Amino acid sequence: MKVAKSITCNSIYTEVDAIMYDNGKIYLGLSGEERVELPLSMCNRHGLIAGATGTGKTVTMKVLAESLSDAGVPVFLCDVKGDVAGICAPGADSEDMQKRIERFGLTGKFAYRGYPTTFWDIYQTGGHAVRATVSEMGPSCSPAFSA
């Protein structure tokens, strides 16, 4: 799959794959041995993901986006650096991932898969065009240009 020129990637998955979202909660990780979960009903609040380099900010954002997608909630991500563009394709297995899967108790439940993704393109060359003109905004949005 060539992602760079792709506009939309759709993936089919079974309900068993949606293991980070279960029973109305998003499984974020562990605090000691205790599961940390975010109820879907709390996802309409403001949030902040902060931390030093290598602490898991991008992974946390990706898990939230995937889990919200599993719950049927549309997700809009601004990904200037392209850190999460790979969300449209299934991930690759590695020794580190196997350790993580085991640590979080997901052995036998986890499956690599892609998520439905549309890439917006301000340059209008390889994705969904992002554009707006003053006339499309209407006179109320631009009083200096109204007659």
Image (spheres, helix red, strand yellow):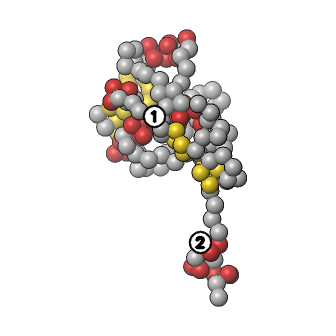
Q: Residue 109 is drawn in which quadrant? A: top left
Residue at position x 44%, y 13% from top? 102
Residue 105 showing in the rendered view:
no
Q: Report helix, strand or loop for mark 1.
A: loop
Q: Residue 82 is drawn in which quadrant? A: top right
Left or right: 137 with respect to 72?
Answer: right
Which is nearer the N-term, disc 1 or disc 2?
Answer: 1
> Which residue lies most toward the left here?
23
Residue 54 showing in the rendered view:
yes
Q: Position of residue 127 (x, y in %)?
A: 62, 47
- Mark 2, other Cα within 10 Å: few <14 / some 14–19 / many ≥20: few
Residue at position x 38%, y 26% from top? 17
Residue 136: which disc? 2
Residue sitting nearer the eye, 50 or 15: 15
Residue 129: which disc? none
Which of pointers 1 and 2 indicates the residue nearer the eye?
1
Q: Are marks 1 and 2 in contact (CB under 8 Å)?
A: no
Q: Amino acid at mark 2?
A: Glu
Residue 11: which disc? 1
Q: Report helix, strand or loop for mark 2.
A: helix
